[in-house]
Image: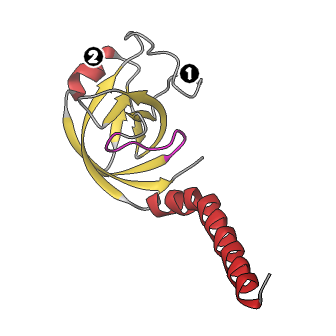
Amino acid sequence: MTGGGATRLAAMRCLLLALALAMMLAPVYALNADAHRTLTVSSTAYCSSEPGGQITADGSRTYFGEVATPRPGLYGSLPLGTLIELISPRQITYRNRTRRLFRARDRIGYGSQLDFFFPSCAAMNAWGRRTVTFRVRSPRP
């Protein structure tokens, strides 16, 4: 191989190595970019008497303090386990329990970008549909 060919081959190897490294690190940078992102979305609520309302997408049991977000690829989707902090309203109260931080543990389809879990269906109905603003606190648990 001539001197010019060896140089091109070495340059190609360096380029491929850099490309492979970038592809491996891209998900890490994407998750870190989500941290502290602020979103304003349409929210609804669900309760445990709805179909599938007692077990979440991550396999845990439902509890006040969890939210469902859209499936990956839809607007507002967050990785399961993501911690969010409410900005407006500043908090949600259910039976003397007040929460400002919620964990994404479940998935929803279309029609809402955030679905809050309430143990009571009456509280779910009282929530209705509301616009909420929240900050992504941590992309993963």
Magenta: main secondary structure equals loop
Residue 21 versus residue 72 in the image, above or below: below
Question: Magenta span covers which residues?
Answer: 74-82
Q: Which residue is mark 1?
A: 61
Residue 25 versus residue 49 in the image, above or below: below
Residue extending farthest right = 1
Relative to residue 42, is residue 94 drawn left or right? Answer: right
Q: Are marks 1 and 2 in contact (CB under 8 Å)?
A: no
The amino acid type, in three-letter code, at marker 2 is: Ala
Q: Is residue 89 visible?
A: no
Horizontal and vertical percent for residue 15?
64, 74
Q: Which residue is mark 2?
A: 122
Q: Quadrant of residue 117?
A: top left
Q: Is residue 127 visible?
A: yes
Q: Residue drawn 53% across and 18% down? A: 55
The amino acid type, in three-letter code, at marker 1 is: Arg
Task: Reply yes or no: does residue 50 show up in magenta.
Answer: no
Front position in the image: 114 or 87 = 114
Q: Residue drawn 52% across and 38% down? A: 80
